[in-house]
Image (spheres, rainbow, N blue to C red):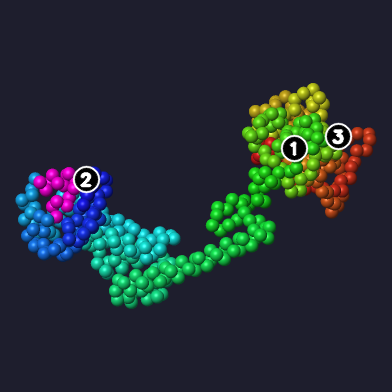
Amino acid sequence: MSTNTTNTSTPLVEHHSLHHAPIITAGVLTPAILLEFEDACEDFIANAKGGVNADVQVTRILPSFKDPIIRGWIASDCLHLSTLKFNVFMKLLRSKFLSKQWEDELLSKILRDHLRPGQEFLTWATSLQQQNCILRNTPSQLDDKRMREQISIAVDMDLRISAREANVNNATSLRDFLEIYTLCDEKRRAAEKRTRSIIDESYRRNKNAGKDNNYHPYRRDDRNSNSNNNATTSTASRPPKLTPLEIEIIKSRFGCFKCRKIYQSKDHINTEASKKTCEFPTKENYRPLTWEYADKIKASRDARKSSSSSKPIASTSSNPPTSSSSSSSSIVELDNSADSDFIASMFGPLSSSAVIGNGTFSTEGDSVCQPFKSKHFIWKCLINGNIDEFPVKISGLIDNGAHMVLILPDTVKLLGLPSFSLPHPEQVDVAISSSQSTKKILSHFVKFKATSLDGL
């Protein structure tokens, strides 16, 4: 019989005949290998011709070790080892060539082992018992009661509930306990197999019917469930390709080829498409650009510029205008030759609380001279209209002498604001009288909300 003396990482136990001692090849010993070798030696002792006396059992198996390290240990203490009993020799062998914590490490591995999804219970439970057998004749070995407790803890909740319904706690032996768990696991696996076959059959039918077959319950679902909300990020939801007419309109009207909006800023137009913050328009309800739409936007922009440059005359006031409003960044003071000809406000006789100066009366007369006119204070604000999707910039005159807020008809038309009839028409006139009649009848009003340019 040939033997393998090559040093390998994992040794092998060779036992070709029960009448001869087993052989363990060279390599690093493990608890499982030593248990296999011990069982082979017991088979040899029990079946050898003529029997093997207890005092020579260790002597008969010492030549079985082919690892040079173990053979050196045997040679150095051969006389003493030959006098030991077989079970004492095996205990000494484990203490010499196994880790001092091998029992704790193996027990910890058993306690950490859990039934994985898709794994058969019987295969897993058998492996668990085999590992526990390696701890044979040690205090760390689990008895039947502790093994049942460990199995109940290590299985999943569904299988544990099924076994509990099958009265697994009434099992009298570990074998009956394992049989109940195995039967419950087989029922569960059969039900999962039926469910999977039904789903696969339904999937095949949908595929043959030409329906959307991108979804499968056991495959990754790459469909965009929020296609309506994320349409701008999907290539399929983009609008059709630009026509030559649209390209001409975008080029001539300062448009963006990505969002397809005209009259955009120069910085926005010159920015690279990959760095633009705007998005592609959605395919749904997309309307191609036309010259009519472009002319309409241009007319709206021109009307907005003309309305913002107009300077209306304020009505009269009996109180001087407050200067605290000028602290806002949206309020500007007009100071040029053209604006100085307009009367912003007029003042009546002053009271003691309206004296301009240090708060004392002049000694030269009973009255104090006050300014005849003051400068305009314009509030530049934003108003949301119904025609354009962006707010329109409007300039308003701050005048607390007027008893109502007035808006130009052209501005109402520009914003597209709906008008409502007044309960009673109002008659108004200018603050400065003239030879011609300037009375006007106000019969309608509009509703709007104005915000400052700084968002206040």
- Please name whichever residue, 372 or 292, is drawn nearer the observer in this view of the structure: 292
Do the residues bearing badges 2 and 1 touch, measured as CB atoms within 8 Å?
Answer: no
Nearer the observer: mark 3 or 1; the answer is 1
Q: Is residue 64 magenta?
A: yes
- The image shows residue 191 at horizontal and vertical percentages of 49, 68
Question: Of the residues shown, which amino acid type is indicated by label 2?
Answer: Thr
Q: Earlier in the sequence, mark 3 or mark 2?
A: 2
Give the side of residue 403 with respect to residue 97, left or right. right
How many numbered marks, from 0 up? 3
The answer to whether residue 312 is seen in the rendering is no
Q: Is residue 242 magenta?
A: no
The secondary element bearing badge 3 is classed as: loop
Which residues make up the magenta segment?
61-75
**Picture disc at residue 138:** none
- The image shows residue 352 at horizontal and vertical percentages of 69, 35
Q: Residues within 10 Å of mark 2 (few under 14, many from 20)?
A: some
Q: Residue at x 43, y 60 (%)?
A: 117
Residue that protrudes farthest toward the front in the picture: 1
Q: Which residue is mark 2?
A: 5
Question: Of the residues shown, which amino acid type is indicated by label 3?
Answer: Ile
Which of the 4 image quarters holds residue 373? Answer: top right
Give the side of residue 429 with respect to residue 126, left or right. right
Which of the 4 image quarters holds residue 152? Answer: bottom left
Residue 341 vs 31, above or below: the answer is above
Q: Which residue is mark 1?
A: 261
Do the residues bearing badges 3 and 2 touch, measured as CB atoms within 8 Å?
Answer: no
- The image shows residue 372 at horizontal and vertical percentages of 78, 29
The answer to whether residue 272 is seen in the rendering is yes
Q: Which residue is mark 3?
A: 432
